[in-house]
Image (cartoon, rainbow, N blue to C red):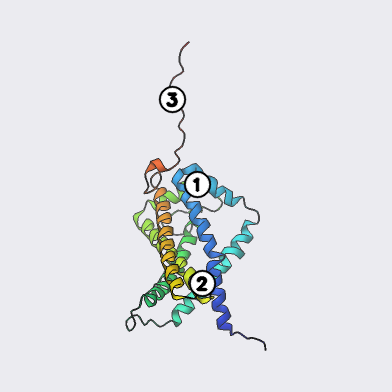
Amino acid sequence: MAVTYSRNFLLRKLHQLTGIVPLGLFFFAHMFTNAKAMNGEKVFEKAVQDIHDLPFLLFIEIFGIFLPLAFHSIYGIIISSEARSNVMSYGYGRNWFYLFQRITGVFLFFFIIFHLLHYRFGIVPGLTDIAVAGNAVGSFQIVANDLAIPWVLAIYILGVAATAWHLAYGFWLFAVDWGILIGTNAQRYALYGCAALAFGLFAVGTNAAFSFLRPCGLLPAALCEQPVKASSSAPKSV
């Protein structure tokens, strides 16, 4: 007997899958690249240039990032509009977590649009008009100039926090809904692990943002690679 699935079921599974691969992997790669700002301008700009040098970069962006992102974001908004919160009647932790997932999803829909218009295309009024894309040399200063504006920095820290939670809890929802986590204990310990992952991603992303403003970000400068300064001492006379 053939098994049939509803269109809504398949769309929700595809929505979950795109949140993990490729978008989840892209976020990890994005945080790794941004974290290189800890070691200074040259290290970060080399990382950006390495991305620009990838073969078939435009196809990777379109089919590996933009299209999955558009589907995941738009369908996520549809899911959020259909959701009915019951936290006031049933204030269980998982109900609150699900509500936060929907709230962060809506926030990220607008944040990602802002982020793309800001640094990908450089067309946000009042901010940089030079896109990071295609400008590896000078990209560090492009980012640093706008993150020095307090409200811009605050938006990006909120964006990192929302993304960290949304992705980490999304891992947990994916594992539960796909039957990977079945037992109560397994689900509880996995939730602890996902909470730790969310905190770790938030810490890495926040420190990366501050690394554009001061060496090593919020960490002690001794932990980061420092540029080698040329010796200024005069040559000894013979």
Please tell me which residue lies in front, 91 or 48: 91
Q: Residue 20: image x %, image y %?
A: 53, 67
Residue that numbered label 2 is attached to: 175
Q: Residue at x 41, y 45 (%)?
A: 216
Please tell me which residue lies in front, 54 or 190: 190
For numbered disc 3, what is the local secondary structure? loop
Q: Amino acid at mark 1?
A: Phe
For numbered disc 2, what is the local secondary structure? helix
Residue that numbered label 1 is attached to: 44
Q: Earlier in the sequence, mark 2 or mark 3?
A: 2
Q: Residue at x 35, y 78 (%)?
A: 92
Q: Marks 1/2: CA distance?
A: 34 Å
Q: Nearer the viewer, mark 2 or mark 3?
A: 2
Q: Marks 2/3: CA distance?
A: 58 Å
Q: Nearer the viewer, mark 1 or mark 2?
A: 2
Query: Counting other residues with Cα less than 10 Å from the Cα at mark 2, is it few (<14), some (14-19), or many (20 or more)?
Result: some
Q: Residue at x 54, y 53 (%)?
A: 133
Q: Residue 187: image x %, image y %?
A: 45, 72
* Residue 71 appears in the figure: no
Query: Would residue 57 appear left or right of 223 to someone viewing this image?
Result: right
Q: Residue 154: image x %, image y %?
A: 36, 58
Residue at far top of view: 238
Residue that numbered label 3 is attached to: 232
Quadrant location of the N terminus in the rendered image: bottom right
Q: Amino acid at mark 3?
A: Ser
Q: Marks 1/3: CA distance?
A: 26 Å
Please tell me which residue lies in front, 83 or 225: 225
